[in-house]
Image (cartoon, rainbow, N blue to C red):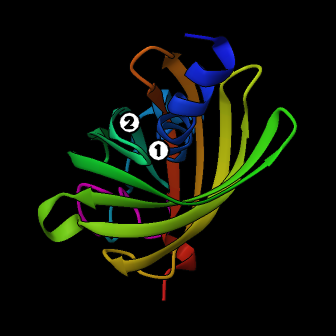
Amino acid sequence: MSSTRTLRLAFPAIVGFLVFALSGCAEGPTPTQPGDAVLSKAATAPNQPVRLEFAKCAIAEGVWEGTVTGDIEGDLRTELTSLREAGPIWHVTFNWIVTAGEQSFTAALSGTLNTLTGRVVMNGTIVEGYLVGAQVHEEGQLVDAVNSCFAGTIRIMPATAD
């Protein structure tokens, strides 16, 4: 299989992976001070970012499934809703669907996939569920081109929620 074909198959997985892969996840939760309100396990203080790591692989054309860990733990499904190829940089839009009980949410993210490096960067908003209205930043990387698997981080900014 050619590398171009492999990247075309892997692209949706990469993009989905990057949405949930944001820098800073390794820092862990920020300790709270006496009197700080704690929203839930997902946010140690009302305005602190919710940090997640994700891993996902393609299960069908335009669909990836995997898991999220970190401040929220659950199942992940990403669905490619649009793709515009512009040379090696593809412009993509995805729905990120996280199933995690009361912290379940759907985020609409768009950004770019670099087909030369496998790097994905997307931004968007939670459109349904937990922290609706909050801004989301995702960074990911293609980690397995054969199976179109991505891994990365995602950061949700609760202070921007409705």
Please report the residue visible at 50 percent of the width from the left and 46 percent of the height from the top. 154
| Residue 38 visible in the current orientation | no
* Residue 62, placed above or below residue 38: above
What is the spatial separation of the Cα atoms under label 1 and label 2, in whole angstroms? 5 Å
- Residue located at (53% from left, 47% from top): 19
How far from the left and from the top, in percent, is residue 110? 65, 60
Question: Which residues make up the magenta segment?
Answer: 38-48
Is tag 1's residue or tag 2's residue first in the polypeptide sequence? 1
Q: Residue at x 30, y 56 (%)?
A: 42
Residue 120 lies left or right of residue 27; in this view the side is right
Q: Give the percent coordinates (x, y) of residue 66.
A: 27, 37
Q: Name the residue at the left extreme.
A: 101
Nearest the eye: 94 or 61: 61
The residue where tag 1 is placed is 20
Q: Which quadrant would the N terminus be assigned to in this image?
A: top right
**Residue carrying label 2:** 54
Residue 80 vs residue 53, the one in the foreground = 80
For the stretch drawn in magenta, the main secondary structure is loop
